[in-house]
Image: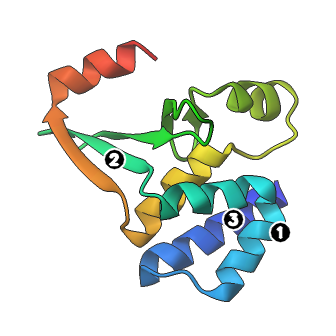
Amino acid sequence: MMGMKVAESVWRSIESSGSVTDEHLSILHFLFGKNFESATRIVDQGGVKKISGEPSGRSIFQVVGESRRKEEYFCFAESYCACYSFFYDVVSRGEQLCCKHQLAARLAASIGSCKEAKIPDEELAILLSEL
């Protein structure tokens, strides 16, 4: 999909500079719409945690949702989220390229604004087996 190629190019540019320009924001908003607006709010509120296993360095993101219940969703920024929207809008209907939690994870990781947690690889394996 052309949209994904454009998005990847923008993400690489953000990652290499460690900052987001107005041009980046407008392209990502054009591609992802309201999901991107939600993602920026989640990042601004410090709602993204990167959980890394040691010693492997493998990681997963834990992202706080926007509902009043503040559910937390585990996701891989580029390929999976445990939220309902990912399965309904991305996988089942193909209406979105990704969900807001994935976008928040990618944005926070790109600009270095994730909270960081380190856990033993064994604990990470257990966490992943429960997804």
- Residue 57's place in the image compared with 108, above or below, is above
**Image point 68% across, 76% down: which residue?**
25
Camera-side residue of 120 and 22: 22
Q: Amino acid at mark 3?
A: Ala
Q: Amino acid at mark 1?
A: Phe
Camera-side residue of 77 and 41: 41
**Image point 63% across, 73% down: which residue?**
10
x and y, in percent, of residue 56 in the image = 18, 39
**Image point 57% across, 68% down: which residue?**
11
Q: Which residue is mark 2?
A: 50
Give how far apart the Cα atoms at labels 3 and 2 are.
Answer: 21 Å
Q: Residues within 10 Å of mark 2 (few under 14, many from 20)?
A: many
- Residue 9's place in the image compared with 59, above or below, is below
Give how far apart the Cα atoms at labels 1 and 2 are.
Answer: 26 Å
x and y, in percent, of residue 96 in the image = 81, 44
Rendering quarter of residue 39: bottom right
Q: Residue 30, which numbered label?
A: 1
x and y, in percent, of residue 129 in the image = 37, 14
Q: Which residue is mark 3?
A: 7
Q: Is residue 130 toward the left or the right of residue 31 in the image?
A: left
Q: Amino acid at mark 2?
A: Lys
